[in-house]
Amino acid sequence: MADLTAVQPPLARTRWLGPELAVVVAGVTAALLFPDDLGFITRINILAIFTLSLALVIGQAGIATLGQAAMFGAGSYSAALWAIHITPEPLSGVLIGALVGASVAAASGVLMLRTRGLTLLMLSVAVAQVLLETANKAGSVTGGDDGLADIPVSPILGVFAFDFRGQVGFGYTLAALVLVYFCLRRVVASPFGLTCRGIRADQVRMRAVGAPVFRHLLSVYTLGGAVAGIAGALSAQTTQVVGLNSLGFELSAEGLVMLTIGGVGHLAGALLGVPAFMIIRHVAASINPYHWLLVIGLLLIVTILFLPQGLYGLPEKGRAMVRRRPK
Amino acid sequence: MTLFASIMIDGIAYAMILFMIAVGLSIALGLMHVVNMAHGAFAMLGGFTAVLLMQRAGWRYEFAVPVAVLLTALASVPVERYLISRVYRRPELDQALLTIGVAFVAIALVNLWLGASFVSIAPPPWLSGPVDLGFRSFPRHRLAVILLGFVVSAALWIFIERSRFGVRLRAAVDNAGIAQTVGINTARLYSAAFAIGAGLAALGGIAGAELLPMEANYPVKYLVLFLAVVAVGGQGTLFGTFLAAILLGVIDTAAKYLLPDIASISFYLTMLVVLALRPQGLFGRKEAA
């Protein structure tokens, strides 16, 4: 029952910066090939960070959540309010987003993480919905239904001003993505990451060998909240608007779908799933929004039934099939 | 007093609908340990089948509804057999994602076929119009829904407590392995329980179309509602699901009457409080280990 496939990356392998480099190359190539779609690519970068937070929380620690948007939205709103009321300096805004995201995760985690299964799933949904409704009602602060628009952003480090074509926004989010990926890969490879995977595989046994299960879950959930908060802050800064949809159920579910398509057990799954999902949606939705739902539904069914490791597991699966054939 | 009665009648009618739809979900969770995010699709399927039978085939309401319920139950059998049963032993996240995929496909198909607009299921004259209860008149349909809900709950309870099927069902909920060992065909049992749940969802969907209007997006739009009832009640307990439906239905309705500003929050807050205090739900058994 316990799936131990993900119990590998040894610490030594993380000294190699290949995966980070691959992200940079892929991002820059995409930007060079489609210079008119930088906004779209920036969105992919941001959602990749968000989905990385899910890959950490769900893929590593096995915390089944459908409420990750709570932290994304909290980061988004707090970065926007920080920019409007305190300073438009973007890096401090990202820091605030991360802090608020982490705080929301820590506070809700205390409530959620002692439960499992459906209860955990429903608690995560409830937390996000309560935040959403609160933001909706607190119109004087959050703008309610209209959200916050025209969020001021000053040049990054005082040098790179956000431009109309979105080149700076693209570079800024790509840098953030690579940095987050770099850090999370080290977390995953650390003993802490290994313990988290152990908890995912079998909570009871981990408790029996003396691992502080709840504390680990709370730490990893808080870290995931910080990462989601960063993604939210970046979204607020690059689009200069924040709306209620940043806290919505749809975002949480989409993140989960993207991660599933890419491969749940690996951080790289998030990086593969997000562009795949976004591109398929872009193409399918331009034909008919309901075709898109059909495509995504079938994609989910096929992935769960035949590709439990997602796109990430595709090469392995192909190799296994080739190997089997000669016999 | 009038206000109180209004809240109770509307709230309990709402609760009966929630119960009829959610009970199949609760059985699936208790019996097969599967989180079925596609459950709302069966309510929608029932609703649309009834509408089609009435509008295109010109059937009377009294015939269309039971046939729609039956057809939905039949349609659920291959879905369980060939799709959902494949993830019974997988982590709940896989189950949730597979079944939400099924729900997406159902939404897309209904949409391609019938469009995105709302459809109404018009009850026959003897079920519509107001009925005077002395202090206020209430919609007759709403009172009928309450009656139907109580009849269905009682019938289901007797069925599970007294019938051979019920005995097997309870045995499999308690311990599927041993139930199998003593010769109970659990695979067939699962199919049957799933079909009953789907049929009840169809009935609830049709009866509740006034409160939860039928549209292509139905399965996802009200998903959280149905899941909340199951989580609050405790999975796999009939009584728990019933009480949770009453609790959430009445609180939600009361909030809409008394505090319309925070009505949507109150539903989630209730769920949050109950689950924080009792993670296994009101009447759920404590999980082993």
Image: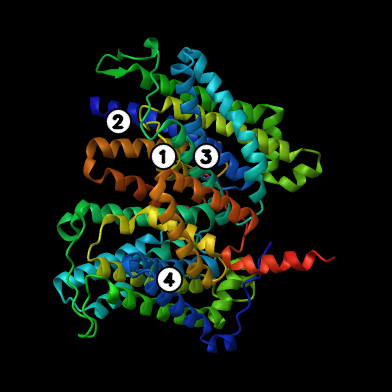
In three-dimensional space, the C-alpha distance between marks 2 and 1, rounded to whole angstroms, equals: 28 Å
Q: Residue at x 62, y 59 (%)?
A: A307
Give the residue furthest to the top.
B126
Label 2 or label 3, whichever comes before in sequence order:
2
Describe residue A144's horizontal placement relative to residue A249 as left or right.
left
Q: Position of residue A18 (x, y in %)?
A: 52, 84
Could you tell me how many numbered marks the image carries? 4
Relative to the observer, which residue lies in front, B118 or A168? A168
Nearer to us: label 2 or label 3: 3
Same chain? Circles 1 and 4: no
Query: On the image, which quarter does residue A288 sit in?
Result: top left
Crowd around label 3: few <14 · some 14–19 · many ≥20 (10 Å) = many
Contact, CB < 8 Å: mark 4 with mark 3?
no
Q: Amino acid at mark 3?
A: His
Amino acid type, mark 2: Ile
Residue type, mark 1 in image: Asn
Q: Report the mark closest to the observer, 2 or 1.
A: 1
The residue singled out by tag 1 in the image is: B217
Q: Mark 4 = which residue?
A: A224
Question: Where is the N terminus of chain A found, in terms of image quarters?
Answer: bottom right
Q: Amino acid at mark 4?
A: Gly
Instruction: Give the crowd class for mark 2: few <14, some 14-19, many >=20 residues within 10 Å.
Output: many
**Residue tagged 2:** B7
| Callout 3 and callout 1 share a chain | yes
Q: Position of residue A149 (x, y in %)?
A: 18, 61
Q: Is residue A233 above or below residue B177?
A: below
Q: Chain of mark 4?
A: A
Residue B228 relative to residue B181: left or right: left
Q: Earlier in the sequence, mark 2 or mark 1?
A: 2
